[in-house]
Structures are given as C-alpha cells and as structure tokens.
Image (tube, helix red, strand yellow):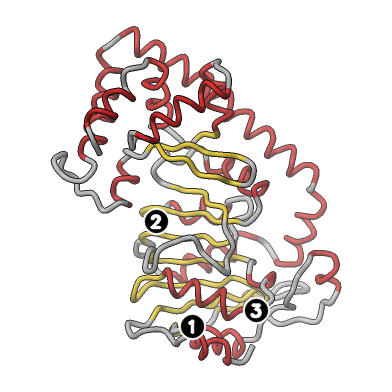
Amino acid sequence: MRIDPLLRALSEPTRLRMMRLLAHMELAVGEVAQVLGQSQPRVSRHIRILCDAGLAERRKEGSWVFLRSAVSEEALVSKGVSSGLSSGLGLGRAAAHLLAVAEREDPQFAARCAEDRRHLAAIRAGREANAQAYFARHAAEWDTLRRLHGADEPVEDALLAALGGHSLGAALDVGTGTGRMAQLLSARADHVTALDKSPEMLRIARARLQSLPADKVDLVQGDFTALPFAPEAFDTVLFHQVLHYAQDLAPVLGEAARVLRPGGRIAVVDLAAHQHEELRERHAHARLGFSDEQMRTQLVAAGLTPAIPVALPGDPLTVKIWTARRNTAPAPDAFERETAPV
C-alpha cells in the first residue's frame, strides 16, 4: 500500500463516510448509494478510488456487487498481515484507526456518521422484512421439509456434540441456505464463511446473520464442486442437508478435504438411505439419502478418517451425522477419488 493514493482517497468527505460505514458491515453498492443519498454512478466512482487505494474491496454476488473494508482486522489477518502497524498493510490499519478516532473527537464528523448509521439501520430492517416475507411465502414447503427431517433442535444439539466442546476455528458452512447453521456455528467459531450457490438464499442468510459482528462472518456465492478458497483455509467444514443435491459426491468431498487444514474436521448432516422417491420430483433431491458404508467409502477416498456416525431416527426419515478428520498425509489423487464406489 502506498501513501499518496491512500491520502488522496481519504481527501473527500463522502469517502470518509463510506469507510466508517464499511467498518460495520459489508454493503451492496446500491445500498451505499441509498445511505449516502447519492447517485449510484457517483458512488461507484468513489468506490473505485477506495479500491484502487487498497482501502476497500468489491465482490460480485449474482447481479449484485458488494463492498467491504479491506483494512478491517479480519481482512488484514486473511492477508497474513501481523498486528503491528509497521508491516504489510499497516498504513491501511492506521487509516482505519484514524477514522475511528476522528468519529470520537470530531463532533461534526461524528454526527454525520451517526446519521449514516441510522439510514443503515433502516436498510437492515428492510432486509429483515424481506426475509420474513420470503419465509411467509414458502411456509408450507419449509414445514413439510422439517417434518420429514424431524425437529431442528435435537439435530443441532447432536451436531455440536459430535464436533466436540472446543473451538471450531475457521468454519465453512457449505450450502448455508437461510444461514441458520452458520448462525449456530458462530458461537463456537473464530470466523464463519457461509457459502451458497443461490444469490436469493444468500440475501436471506445476510438478513439472518446481520446482527453478528462484521468481522465474524462472510457470505460467499460459489459452487460446492469448486470451492473458491485456498487450500487448508478452514478448521471445520459443514454440509447440512446439502449433499443429497449432489450428483457426484467425490468432487464435493474432495473439495472439502482440499480446503481443510491437516487435522481439520468435516461434518455431514443428511438423510439416511431411504425409498421416498417423491423427494426427487418435489424437492429436487439427487440422492435418496446415504448408507453408512457409502459415506465412509467417499470420506476415506477424499483422504479423511471417519468417526462413528450418529443416527437420529425420525418419522418417516432418519437423519445421520457423519464426521471425519483430514489425514496429515496427502489425500488420494483425483484418479483414486474418481474410481471410488459411489
């Protein structure tokens, strides 16, 4: 990071306000424009300047573009920057600290930031209302699925017990859907990344998770067959009622093993093998559950060491929890995974 573009980026009051907004949460570009009361093209120009200076980052999610601070504590840690101001992106951290101090000590700037946050609160309330409306429109479907899977609480309690009582570290919730499991994991994880392929579901999850600290959770659009993360990025990976949508387990579990750190844990919560063929048509299930042997074979092929599975009988379907650890030795190569029985 260079001092000249950083100082130029911070020389405009609107960009100072934007940085204080981003210190609290990730926002869509259109939402930033709404909070600031400026046109989207004008806000986009400010965003480009902040991003060019290394103070902010853009991320596309479907047709939306989200903006986040690049100098928050979590963002700097993810780049491998130490806590000292003298190394790596220390200039960015110093700039963020300066703006926080300015809000405390400059009454006029503080008043403007407070007003911006009031507008931001209205946006967050709108997100929550939209999420509630979505659930209301699909209430019958959700209730049917919940009855098939059994009550949520016993499954969630059993999952946490299966993962043990210690920290989950950096956790990845694959197929987060409405964000319920990411919310559950957040109490025991240092950081949660919630991934889903559907932008609509991510917007619902964003509303559910918006009360968490901005540096506690990330929402990412992506496919579970090609996870957009570096190798060994997570300590815990969760698939909660997701794998029955997978046509082929091998690439999905192979990707999970790739992003797990050595000794990291994977948990799969899904249906035991069943014969309810109607779920294929009514709920787009690609797989009618899994047997213990089938899941064990796939976990081992991905370079994982399975534990004893947990069964939670329901009416009419049984939920199973399969857990495994990543081996310290390299996982089998792609050919070995592809030839493992499904």
Helix, strand or loop status at disc 3? loop
Residue 248 numbered mark, or none: 3
Question: Which is more N-terminal, label 2 or label 3?
Answer: 2
In the rendered image, residue 81, in percent from the top left (x then y), is placed at 23, 49
Residue at the disc numbered 1 = 302
Q: From the viewer's perspective, is 188 left or right of 221? A: left
**The one of 134 and 184 positioned closer to us in this rendering:** 134
**Disc 1 residue crowd, few under 14, some 14–19, many 20+, Cα 10 Å:** many
* For discs 3 and 2, the disc positioned in front in the rendered view: 3
Decide if residue 142 is on the left or right side of residue 224: right
Judged left or right of residue 29, residue 303 is left
| Disc 3/disc 2 C-alpha distance (Å) | 29 Å
Percent from the top left, x then y, of residue 239?
A: 56, 67
- The answer to which of marks 1 and 3 sits earlier in the sequence is 3
Q: Residue 189: which numbered mark, if any?
A: 2
Q: Which structural element holds mark 1?
A: loop
* Residue at horizontal 44 percent and vertical 82 percent from the top: 304
Specify the amino acid type for callout 2.
Answer: Ala
